[in-house]
Amino acid sequence: GQNIDQPTEMTATEGAIVQINCTYQTSGFNGLFWYQQHAGEAPTFLSYNVLDGLEEKGRFSSFLSRSKGYSYLLLKELQMKDSASYLCAVRDLGDDKIIFGKGTRLHILP
Amino acid sequence: NAGVMQNPRHLVRRRGQEARLRCSPMKGHSHVYWYRQLPEEGLKFMVYLQKENIIDESGMPKERFSAEFPKEGPSILRIQQVVRGDSAAYFCASSVSGGTYEQYFGPGTRLTVT
């Protein structure tokens, strides 16, 4: 089976840094995704990791450890517009569908 | 607008009616995925289609739900005899091929069953 865990909610302050963790258990692994979803809107792609290590893209970075079944999304210099849900998702080996976690709702305080 | 199109954006149906949700993938994309998102829940995979083929429907309820992606025209997700529990946001995503990593999501259709 497949299981993806991430915190339900987090709160951070504008200008600060926040790390959103995701752990997963899958029978196979073929990549991990992070999506951002604002309330009432479609998810938008943030990052994709298939190899261990850190991928940096502007204020957002994503890390993957396949041996630990662990990933995190790091958001720097937080802005109010970063208030959204962040979805961790995993693609199983040999499978083209993506399994999503329930998402982490991030609240940014001024 | 070259993005994924979904219509209608909002759909209200009474219990027992049929709901038809449409999805036009991005230009050049031949792979379509449907997801359902219940309030306060994550996205749940429903079905993956290519033109004229259902590739994976492991997330589709066994009854009342069907999907198609004809050679011409949009992909259709059909829900027959809707019940209140079908109220949710239904998102469609497309990709250029099944092996690519990025899926582009449409704006979703919010179905309300009264």
Image (cartoon, coloured by chain):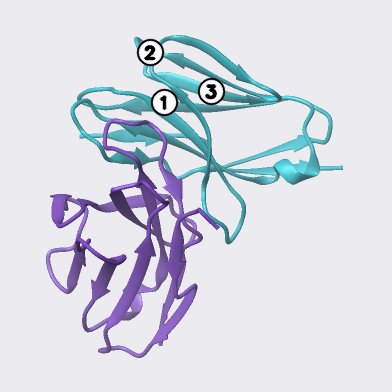
Q: Which residue is mark 3?
A: A72
Q: Is residue B73 above or below residue A31?
A: below
Contact? badges 1 and 2 (CB < 8 Å): yes
User: Which of the marked residues, 1 or 2, is nearer the chain's N terminus?
Assistant: 1
x 18%, y 68%: residue: B66
Q: Nearer the viewer, mark 3 or mark 1?
A: 3
Q: Of the residues shown, which amino acid type is indicated by label 3?
A: Tyr
The quadrant of the picture occupied by the N terminus of chain A is top left
Say how many tags the image has: 3
Parent chain of label 3: A
Position of B104 with respect to B35 (left or right) is: right
Residues packed near mark 1 inside 10 Å, few (<14), some (14 to 19) or many (20 plus): some
The percent position of residue B80, horizontal first and vertical second, equals 21, 80
Pointer 2 residue: A68
Distance between mark 3 and mark 1 Cα atoms? 9 Å
Chain under label 1? A
In the figure, is residue A64 to the left or right of B49?
A: right
Task: Give the numbered dot on residue A23.
Answer: 1
- Packing grade of label 2 (10 A; few <14, some 14-19, many >=20) is few
- Name which quarter of the figure residue A33 lies in: top left
**Marks 1/2: CA distance?**
8 Å
Where residue A11 appears, as percent x and y from the top left, is 71, 39
Which colour represents chain B?
purple
Q: Amino acid at mark 1?
A: Thr
- Crowding at dot 3, Cα within 10 Å, few <14 / some 14-19 / many 20+, comes out as many
Residue B50 image position (x, y, % from top left): 21, 50
Calculate the distance from the C-alpha at mark 3 to the C-alpha at mark 2: 12 Å
Q: Chain of mark 2?
A: A
